[in-house]
Every structure is written in C-alpha cells, then in structure tokens.
Amino acid sequence: MDLLSNKWIINLLVCCFYLGKWFSSGAGCRHTLTCVRCNSVEKKIYVHLNYKIPCVRLLNATHQIGCQSSLSGNVGVLHVLESEENLDWVLRSGPNPPYMVILEYRLFTRSIMMKLKNGSGRVAGVAVVAPNTNPAAGFSPHNTCPNENTGVYTEKYDPTMAHCNVTVWNPLGNGLSYEEFDFPIFSLKDDNETQVIRQCYYDHNHVVNGSAPQYPLCAMQLYSHMSAVTDTATCMRRNDINFSLNPDMVCDPLGDFNVWASTRPINNTAKGHKNGESVVIAAARLDSRSFFFDIAPGAESGVSGFVTLLAAAHALRNVTQEAHLNRTILYTFFQGETFDYIGSSRMVYDMEKNQFAVDLDNVHSVLEIGQVGLRPNSTLWFHSDPVSRRNNSVNEEVCVENSRKLEIKTIFSATGLNVSVEEPGFSQPLPPSSFQRFLRARPIPGVVIEDHKSAFTNRFYESMYDNGEYLNISYPPNMTPEEQLEHITDTARVSKVSKAGPPLSTFYFFLSVTQMLYSFLVQSNNSWIQQLMTSDYANHLTDRPANLYVGVAVQQSEPTYLVQHLLANLTGSTVNATQDNCKNQRMDPDDKDSKHLYYYFWVQGAAPPNSTERQGFCVRSTVRLSKALSPAFDLHQYTSTDYSTWTESRWKPITGRIFLVASHDLEMLTLGVGIGILLTSLLLTYFFSSKAEILFSSGREPATATY
Ligand SMILES: *[C@@H]1O[C@H](CO)[C@@H](O)[C@H](O)[C@H]1NC(C)=O
Ligand SMILES: *[C@@H]1O[C@H](CO)[C@@H](O)[C@H](O)[C@H]1NC(C)=O
Ligand SMILES: *[C@@H]1O[C@H](CO)[C@@H](O)[C@H](O)[C@H]1NC(C)=O
Ligand SMILES: *[C@@H]1O[C@H](CO)[C@@H](O)[C@H](O)[C@H]1NC(C)=O
Ligand SMILES: *[C@@H]1O[C@H](CO)[C@@H](O)[C@H](O)[C@H]1NC(C)=O
Ligand SMILES: *[C@@H]1O[C@H](CO)[C@@H](O)[C@H](O)[C@H]1NC(C)=O
Ligand SMILES: *[C@@H]1O[C@H](CO)[C@@H](O)[C@H](O)[C@H]1NC(C)=O
Ligand SMILES: *[C@@H]1O[C@H](CO)[C@@H](O)[C@H](O)[C@H]1NC(C)=O
Ligand SMILES: *[C@@H]1O[C@H](CO)[C@@H](O)[C@H](O)[C@H]1NC(C)=O
Ligand SMILES: *[C@@H]1O[C@H](CO)[C@@H](O)[C@H](O)[C@H]1NC(C)=O
Ligand SMILES: *[C@@H]1O[C@H](CO)[C@@H](O)[C@H](O)[C@H]1NC(C)=O
Ligand SMILES: *[C@@H]1O[C@H](CO)[C@@H](O)[C@H](O)[C@H]1NC(C)=O
C-alpha cells in the first residue's frame, strides 16, 4: 500500500506540474501578446551574484547606522545611473519604481546617496561598482572628526579644543559610513558578473528617447535583513529575552583582543601594581573600517603604523636584551579603536581596576605610532597634548621624549628610512589616538608619531581604497607569490638607500618589513607566515588582503592572530621543548615560574628541502592577549557616554540575484493560476483518498517496482 500511494502521489504531482505549466504559459502568452517574450521570461533563470559585499547595521547608545533590506529581500527594476541629473528618473519620472540603482564608484557621493535616501520609497537598493584601480580624487566615508566624543578633548577638558575645533583631522570625510539607509547597499567588483548586470539593463530597461521600457524588465533582488533595530540598549535587552527562550541573539558587541608584549618579562598572573616597574607603552592600532562590511584594508590608517611598530620591536630586540634599560617597553596593539577606542579604553579600565599586569602608576609614558605612510622622504610629526603640557613635570618628560627625536631618526635611518622629524605647533591638540584614552585617565606624558602636521595626508581614510595600491605596494607582472614575498617593493626600495647602519641588518629589516606589508596588504597565506603560525590557525590564512574590521567580541580576527604570532617571532626566542610541553605551557619542572612570565607557542616551522614534513619548534615570548571589549558591556551601561557602545546586528545569509520580471498584472495572474492549481489538487486529493478503497483495492504492483 505504501508503494502504491507513493506512486500515486508522484503521478498527482507530475500531473499538477504539467497543468501548471500549461496554465501559466497560456496565461502569459495571452497577456504579453508576443510569445517570444514570454518564453524568454520562462527560460531566464535567476543569476546569482557571487561577489557582493554588503553594508551592515551597527548600533550605538543612541543610533543605528548602516543598511538593511526588508525581511524578504528588496526587489527593484535595475537602473544604471549615468550622472547625477539621471537621478530624476529614479526619484520622480521613471514609471516602474522601485528601482535598484547601479552606481559607478565616482557617483557614490554624499550628495547622490542622500538624495536616494530621501527618496527611499522609490529606491529598492543600491549596488556600487568598485573600481579595479583606486580613484584619483580622495574619498573617505568616515566623519571629519573621528571619535569626536570619546577622546580626551571634551568640553570639560578644554572647551576650545572639543569637537575638532582647532584642527579638522579628516576634511575629506563625507560621513556616509555613519548614515542610516533603509535599503540595502552592496559593493560589486567590476568584472564579468557586473557586465552581465549592465547588459541585462541595456537589453531590457534602457530608456530610448525618453519612452518607458517595456516588460519584461531586468530586476535585482538583494537580501540583507538585519535582526537588530533602534539602538544598543534595545538589542541587548532583546538578546536577554531571547536567550531565555532560545539562543538566538540579535546583536553582538564589537570587540576582539589587544596584543601586547614586554621587553622584560612581567608576571602576568599577578595583576595590578608592580613595585619598581616603569613601563613605556609603545602603541599602534590594529583596526580600520570602510563603508562595506568586510573590505577594510586600512593600509595607511592601520597597517603602516603597526608594521612600523613590529619592525621597531624587531630592531630593538638585541638592544633591549643586551643593554639593561631602566624601563620596560610594553608593545601594545589596540583593537577596535575605530569604534570609540574599544581596545585602549578597555586596557585603561583594566589598569584602573587592577585587572592588568601593570597599573597606571607603572606607566611612565606613551609613544604611539599612528599613520606613517611609509613614503619616501616623509616627515614624521611628533604630536603632543598642549593641555597636559601646561603641567611642568609632564612638559619636561614630553620635552625629553621630543629630544629623543634624534635617537628615533637614528633608528629609522639605521634601518634605511630617510625621514625627518618635526613637531607641529605647541597649541595643536592630539590627532585621534589611543593615547587620548590614557590622558582621559590622568596626565601621562606622551607623543603620537604621524606623517601629517595637521589634517591627515591620507586621502582614503577608513575607505576601501586605503589599500596596498595606495601605499605603492606593487610587483612586476608575472611574479609568483613566492617571488613577490621576497621582493623589496618600491615603498621600501626608495627609502632603502642609506649610508648609516650595517648593510646586512638593513637588508633583513627591509625583508621583514616588506614581508609584513605583503602579508597584510596582498595575502597572508604565504610560506613565511605559515612558518610562524601554530598549525590550528594556519589553515585560516587567506589569499586576499587582511580585513581590518574589528568583528564581534570576543573572537580573534585574522589581523590579531597575525600580529600575535609575528610579535612572538620578532621579539621571542626559540626554546628546546617537546610539542606537548610547549603547547601546555609546561616547561622545566624546576622553572615553575616561567608560565607566569612567558607564553609558549608551538609553531609549524618550515619543511627541510627534501621533505614535506614541517619541523615545528617552540617559541618563548612575552606576547599576551587582553580583552578588547568595551567596559560598557561588562558594566551593562548600554547608554554610556564614556565607553564605546557599538554593537553589530546579526543577519541571515546575504544574497543577491538578477532576473527578468513580468509586469505586475502578469505576476498577479500567475498567482491566481497557482491558487487555482492548489485548489484543484486539493479536490483531487480528497476525491482519490475518499475513493481509495475502490481505486486501489486490486491490481497490486509487484514489490520490486522502482521509482
Ligand atoms: C526630500 O524629498 C522631499 C519630497 O519627497 C522634498 O520636498 C525635499 O526637499 C527632499 N529633501 C532633501 C534634503 O532633498
Ligand atoms: C572654537 O573655539 C574658539 C575659542 O574658544 C571659539 O571662539 C570658536 O567659536 C570655536 N569654534 C567652533 C566652531 O566651535
Ligand atoms: C551614535 O552614532 C551616531 C552616528 O554616528 C552619533 O551621531 C551619536 O553621537 C552616537 N551616539 C553616541 C552616544 O556616541
Ligand atoms: C570573464 O571574461 C573574460 C574575457 O571576457 C574571460 O576570459 C573570463 O573567462 C571570464 N571569466 C568568467 C569567470 O566568466
Ligand atoms: C530617437 O529619436 C531620434 C530623433 O528624435 C530618432 O532619429 C531616432 O531614430 C530615435 N531612436 C530610436 C531608437 O527610436
Ligand atoms: C607571579 O605571580 C604569582 C601569583 O601572584 C606567583 O605565585 C608567582 O610566584 C609569581 N612569579 C614570579 C616569577 O614572580
Ligand atoms: C641580534 O643578535 C643576533 C646574535 O646575537 C644576530 O644574529 C642578529 O643578527 C642580531 N639582530 C639584529 C637585528 O641586529
Ligand atoms: C638608570 O637608573 C639608574 C639609577 O636609577 C641611573 O643612575 C641611570 O642613569 C639610569 N640610566 C638611564 C639610561 O637612564
Ligand atoms: C627625496 O629627497 C631627495 C633629496 O633630499 C631628492 O633628491 C628626491 O628627489 C626626493 N624624492 C622624492 C620622491 O621626493
Ligand atoms: C622566526 O621565523 C623565522 C622564519 O622566518 C625562523 O627562522 C626563526 O627561528 C623564528 N624565530 C623565532 C624566535 O621564532
Ligand atoms: C633538547 O632537549 C633534548 C632532551 O632534553 C636533548 O636531548 C637535546 O640535545 C636538546 N637539544 C638542543 C639543541 O639543546
Ligand atoms: C635528505 O634526506 C636524507 C634522509 O632522509 C638526509 O640524510 C639528507 O641529509 C637530507 N638532505 C638535505 C639536504 O636535507
């Protein structure tokens, strides 16, 4: 009986299918007159977009920013925007709204985007075609005064310096990254796929002599619905409610891990103040962002600074191990700084709460490396805080640090960089920097090294164009990845010519700098990085530039892993230990203290020439991770004005596709036919099942029948 009824159902389905085909094709033909057209509607299957980067929703204490589609995705008729004047078709005159607007990157401006936002009833979504080479003009979707309210320059600290009153740091910033759009915005690559979209538009939707195009029209559907709405407090509350019912969260706090290491081992088990310890924090930031979710190359805004700090840590390894410096250098790499200083505010908070290996009393001074474009003949500017320098003792220390300009210049020139070092005017406040979070706690002396005197020289701050190309990381064509890795690029080559310093170490310095630049700006999946990684992370390495977007807490992102392992390699030493002991931090039985002072990595190493088996080894270093999660989330202060409150919405898989749509009427008709078929099949089912005994009581099929 089972078999029998199965076959029966299949027959019924097949029958319905043909009925449906017959109905819908007949209906379609009648409606659109030309059957050639309706055939093309049927034959055209959906074309799914493979490469598409969405803009996603982020929330803070008071606002939501970013983009989203409706729950079932947004569908619109394609319109390739040719100029700003052409907007009128989308916003007013076009007869088939809503439109899915395809923008060339040069039309991705604030003016056009705000007009589209205002007319959002007629806009289903926007797809921006990213160029294959960087635009000539500058572009920054960030705001003009980054982290305006969470640095040190508040009304309370010095009203004349609040809100970038003295210097507007990012004058090119158009603020698009901080707008809210109630339609999806995607980024597409300029390739064959985009060509298919354009062709579909020109074949079906192109307006000839002002007359409206005829159905069927080429349409696009973008799906990027975001679960979280309103603000962080709202979504955290919904997280709590949801958590008790099912583990479906709606948003997650932004965050990651800070990476730090000290030139002298510090007992990391004992938290809080360390008597007699005086540390100089040498800092850089690890993260960046752009308008779109996972293209944040951050070449100048992030990579240039932390690669310089890594290289300096490498260059200073021998010096700090041999000479007994009075002070310990604490190399710190802060995560999430783009979003109201997540990493640095957390470290300062931990120091205040005795949750970190040292406390603020141990901090002698801060030296931060910001954006240092690594361009030939660049000038480095030592920025300091005019307010805390009014205090004499701080001023003296800053002057001492500034007098080290010569030493710093010597270090740089010893490593081949031909730079000059200068100070901007005394009355200029600090640029956006992690150091500001330390100053917020107390007047610590410090300087921030940047390649700009006042406004940023970076023309692509926090945009997808702040990439390797912008830093002139380029390779002769036809080079294998392996050759590229070893190739000293123009950026490094121009500045390599140097009389000072031993040539050999200069060479190795450059090799490691170019290898680092290659790993972050071209691809991390290369033979050098693979040697330095632990095996469990090595297969996460990617063949594309690193994405410096911070991600959600508390997961280690690719840049954090890379910097952690690079720092261990560049400042640590190899030790003789078995893999098992190394991984379990279990060293000599008589050296019980080592796990308080050091961290051990078992790295993959290289394979010897005639073998494929890698020879791993144990690396001992002082490299540690510390949480980079805003204290606002530990304190449950989701409306905090002191700490970052940024969260990222969750979303379902993001998809996009193009297809031809028939007119609305036709769709309604097809729906009607569909309902008709459903009713008919229900009736049939009822008939068959009520008469089942009569129909199936005889003529059993053999049990071997297959279907
Ligand atoms: C927004 O659109 C309305 C009409 O829908 C128009 O009156 C208004 O001027 C527009 N605002 C901006 C800023 O473009
Ligand atoms: C900047 O500060 C000066 C001095 O207090 C003040 O006169 C000026 O109005 C401020 N400018 C802005 C744009 O707030
Ligand atoms: C939240 O973000 C919006 C948009 O950038 C900004 O205007 C607002 O000041 C932020 N709120 C807080 C509390 O920082
Ligand atoms: C894209 O087009 C080029 C030439 O037009 C062709 O060689 C290439 O195979 C195409 N790529 C894909 C993925 O279709
Ligand atoms: C568009 O209009 C021009 C003159 O008004 C005419 O010569 C041309 O043939 C028209 N093109 C099409 C495709 O109808
Ligand atoms: C580090 O601190 C822990 C906990 O206070 C202590 O047990 C250990 O002996 C210390 N080790 C060193 C080397 O100071
Ligand atoms: C550091 O010292 C080791 C030997 O002690 C030497 O091989 C290495 O080249 C030195 N590194 C630098 C950067 O001078
Ligand atoms: C290190 O400290 C000692 C004593 O505190 C002092 O005599 C010496 O000059 C210091 N050395 C440096 C390089 O600052
Ligand atoms: C760098 O400076 C040198 C001399 O100071 C000059 O000859 C050279 O042209 C400069 N290079 C660039 C790219 O400006
Ligand atoms: C660092 O990596 C290199 C391979 O590039 C390796 O030869 C060296 O031993 C490593 N050093 C440490 C301390 O891990
Ligand atoms: C490493 O340790 C093992 C066992 O303790 C020993 O046999 C070996 O000689 C050591 N190797 C080196 C290079 O010290
Ligand atoms: C190649 O392997 C053999 C044995 O496995 C070894 O004796 C020889 O030294 C290796 N040669 C090189 C260059 O490592």
Image (tube, rainbow, N blue to C red):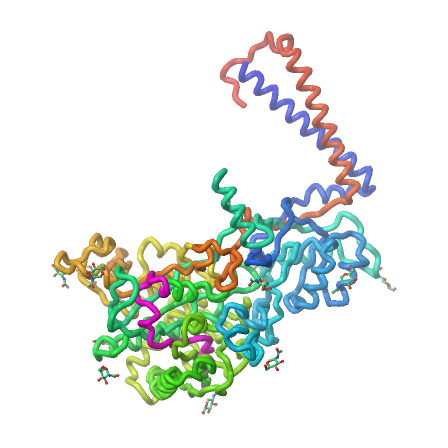
Quarter in which the C terminus is drawn: top right
Q: How many marks?
A: 0
Foreground pick, 284 / 701: 284
Expressed as whole percent of the image width and height from the top left, the position of residue 524 reads 40, 63
Foreground pick, 25 / 462: 462
Please tell me in which quadrant of the rendered image residue 681 appears: top right
Q: Is residue 242 above or below residue 122?
A: above
Q: Is residue 325 above or below residue 69?
A: below
Point 35% across, 70% down: residue: 360
Foreground pick, 210 / 250: 250
Evaluate whether residue 175 shows in this view: yes
Point 71% across, 31% down: residue: 20
Q: Which residues are magenta?
A: 351-377
402 left or right of 665? left
Q: Is residue 70 above or below residue 685?
A: below
Image quarter for ligand 6 equals bottom left
Expressed as whole percent of the image width and height from the top left, the position of residue 324 reads 21, 78
Foreground pick, 630 / 479: 630
Expressed as whole percent of the image width and height from the top left, the position of residue 269 reads 26, 59
220 left or right of 52? right
688 left or right of 387? right
Please tell me in which quadrant of the rendered image residue 389 appears: bottom left
Quarter in which the N terminus is drawn: top right
Point 72% across, 63% down: residue: 115
Answer whether residue 362 is magenta in the image.
yes
Evaluate whether residue 609 shows in this view: no
Expressed as whole percent of the image width and height from the top left, the position of residue 109 reads 66, 68
